[in-house]
Amino acid sequence: MSALEQTLTQIAQRYSPAVLANSLQAEDMVLTHAIATAGLPVGIFVLDTGRLHAETLELVGAIRDRYAVEVNVYTPQAAAVANYVQFHGRDAFYRGLELRQRCCEIRKVEPLARALA
């Protein structure tokens, strides 16, 4: 067993139920591969902010197909996004810290809280 598998096994045992927040970046794909091939009881989830490229989101299906694992996808509340965009514009987060923080709260923080609940 590799050091990575040992560490992931310890995490799965110690912090059950354990979950991986997969960003769909290379390092999380390595972790997903290790979890799936070892058959560890670690859930996997992705935050879809509503701003990800279609090609990025296609990876979710590829993970499911390749590893036969469930990948939960959490999205922001549609009404909150619509309200933000209506009043501030789609790219308002470029216009200042407060708008950027509000956008992150809607698109990332709130869905993450649901994923970890």
Image (cartoon, helix red, strand yellow):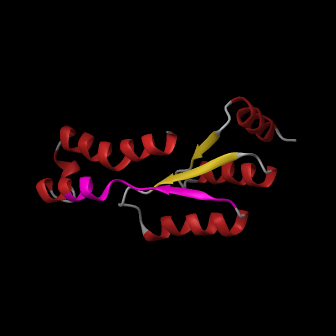
Residue 105: within the magenta? Answer: no
Q: Residue furthest front?
A: 117
Q: Residue furthest left?
A: 87
Residue 76: within the magenta? Answer: yes
Circle count: 0
Q: Is residue 49 placed above or below 56 in the rendered structure?
A: above
Q: Residue at horizontal 88%, vertical 41%? A: 1
Q: Position of residue 26 (x, y in %)?
A: 60, 53
- In the image, is 25 to the left or to the right of 108? right
Q: Residue at horizontal 22%, vertical 49%? A: 93
106, 95: nearer the viewer: 106
Q: Residue at horizontal 16%, vertical 58%? A: 89
- In the image, is 68 to the left or to the right of 27? right
Q: Quadrant of residue 104?
A: top left
Q: Residue furthest right?
A: 1
Q: Position of residue 81 (x, y in %)?
A: 26, 56
Q: Residue furthest top?
A: 14
Q: Residue at horizontal 73%, vertical 49%? A: 35
Q: Position of residue 41 (x, y in %)?
A: 73, 45
- In the image, is 106 to the left or to the right of 30? left
Which portion, as a residue range, is magenta? 69-82
67, 30: nearer the viewer: 67
- In the image, is 76 to the left or to the right of 70? left
Q: Quadrant of residue 72?
A: bottom right
